[in-house]
Image (cartoon, helix red, strand yellow):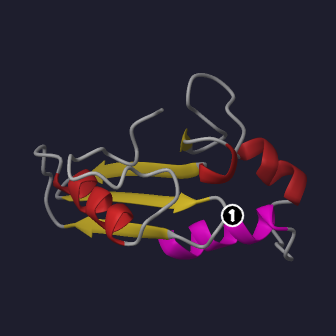
Amino acid sequence: DLARYAIGVRQSLAGISNPVLTQAMTREMLKKQKDHDGLGVFLAGSGNTIRFFHDGRNAGFDAMVIACATGGKGAVVMINANDNSGSVLAIMTLIAKDYQWPGTAPSSSPTPVAEPL
């Protein structure tokens, strides 16, 4: 469901039929409103490298969705633990580097993709 959400946001931004959000509303959603916050999502990058993301936690579960606004790259990680070690973000960082997401550093030092730029 989180992946479908990310795909739906990207399709709406591209002007592909979306029964929930208009293209104009999606543009507003992915525009920095305050600090690095969009409407309902957090934002990183700029221009063609903008990524939208959100993370969450319930008792016993952590999750994160990150997607590039253009280009079709994104991932969802869900684990059945409340892990304060940062493993979800570390997994996302590895995925982004492995699949060469735009705006991610190709260096060997870990740079979280969700960190505001």
Taking the spot 64% from the left edge, 59% from the top edge, the residue there is: 69
Categorize mark 1 by other alpha carbons within 10 Å: few (<14), some (14-19), many (20+). Answer: many
Residue 10 colored in magenta in the image: yes
On the question of residue 1 being in view, the answer is: no
Q: Residue furthest top?
A: 35
**In screen coordinates, is 54 left or right of 85?**
right
Which residues fall within the magenta stretch? 1-14
Count of numbered badges drawn on the protein: 1
Q: Quadrant of residue 68?
A: bottom right
Q: Between 113 and 61, which is closer to the camera in this rendering?
A: 113
Q: Which residue is mark 1?
A: 9
Residue 106 colored in magenta in the image: no
* Residue 72 picture location, percent across and down: 60, 73
* Residue 82 picture location, percent across and down: 15, 52
Per the picture, the main secondary structure of the magenta-coloured stretch is helix
* Residue 77 picture location, percent across and down: 32, 67
**In screen coordinates, is 98 left or right of 37?**
left
Taking the spot 31% from the left edge, 60% from the top edge, the residue there is: 92
Q: Is residue 70 above or below residue 17?
A: above
Q: Is residue 44 above or below residue 67?
A: above
Taking the spot 89% from the left edge, 51% from the top edge, the residue there is: 24
Q: Between 39 and 47, which is closer to the camera in this rendering?
A: 47
Q: Is residue 36 above or below residue 2?
A: above
Secondary structure beneath disc 1?
helix
- Residue type indicated by callout 1: Val
**In screen coordinates, is 34 left or right of 77?**
right
**In screen coordinates, is 61 left or right of 38?**
left
* Residue 48 picture location, percent across and down: 67, 52
Q: Between 95 and 9, which is closer to the camera in this rendering?
A: 95
Q: Residue furthest front?
A: 107
Taking the spot 79% from the left edge, 42% from the top edge, the residue there is: 28
